Image (cartoon, grey):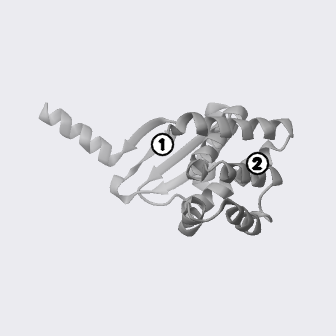
Amino acid sequence: MNRGPITVRYATALFELGKEKKELDKLYTDSKLLLDHCLSVKDFCAFINNPVIKPSQKKKVIHKVLSGEQHPIMLKFVDLVIERNREPLLGDMIRYFEYLYKKFKGIKSVQIITASSLDESYFEELKSYIEREFDAPVEMEAKVKPEIIGGLILVVDDKIIDNSIIHQMKLIKQKFLS
């Protein structure tokens, strides 16, 4: 089954409905929470994707677990996904919905990868600098990867600026070998 068109269709429908009902910001917040459940709670994914469990049972449990923290539109969206047996695509649908939301709002996704954790004050200073440079709101995430030795890797949307020591060492090695 081609995942692309189905994912795009469902995510776009959710996005357009959220825009129409002026609930886009709330749906985006809920989508992040739902995606976090899908990625971090293995039993949640196993439950949702289990073909043996009836859709009515899945919906009942989902409503019990998520009703206090999810907008009714998001719950109805999940119900529709379950009714149409598209549960394995739910994570992709949510990711594409988030992509549409960020594009609509002009939000830049920034990931900073460093060898050690950043000071909170430095992180905030860097975030405000990037917001000024791009003249756009920024959603920033920091990751620690000791294997880069030092420096940093900056990923803005899909563009990578690699100023890590390990990358510099690889460049030097290539120059010596050529």
Mark 2 element type: helix
Q: Earlier in the sequence, mark 2 or mark 1?
A: 2
- Horizontally, residue 36 falls left or right of residue 169, namely right
> Would you say residue 130 is visible in this rendering?
no
- Residues at marks 2 and 1 touching, judged by CB atoms closer than 8 Å: no
Mark 1 element type: strand
Circle 1 sits on which residue?
154
10 Å crowding of disc 1: few (<14), some (14-19), many (20+)? some
Q: Residue at x 65, y 43 (%)?
A: 98
10 Å crowding of disc 2: few (<14), some (14-19), many (20+)? many
The x, y position of residue 37, in whole percent, is 62, 62
> Would you say residue 114 is visible in this rendering?
yes
CA gap, disc 2 and disc 1: 28 Å
The x, y position of residue 159, in whole percent, is 48, 34
Q: Which quadrant does the C terminus fall into?
A: top left
Tell me: residue 43, above or below residue 99.
Answer: below
Tell me: residue 114, above or below residue 99.
Answer: below
Looking at the picture, tell me which residue is in the foreground, 115 or 18. 18
- Horizontally, residue 116 falls left or right of residue 3, namely left
Looking at the picture, tell me which residue is in the foreground, 160 or 93. 93
Amino acid carrying label 2: it is Leu
Query: How many numbered marks, from 0 up?
Result: 2
Q: Quadrant of residue 55?
A: bottom right
Tell me: residue 169, above or below residue 61.
Answer: above
Amino acid carrying label 1: it is Leu
Q: Residue at x 67, y 63 (%)?
A: 58
The x, y position of residue 105, in whole percent, is 72, 35
Q: Quadrant of residue 15?
A: top right
Query: Nearer the viewer's eye, disc 2 or disc 1?
Result: 2
Circle 2 sits on which residue?
27
Q: Residue at x 37, y 52 (%)?
A: 150
Looking at the picture, tell me which residue is in the foreground, 163 or 104. 104
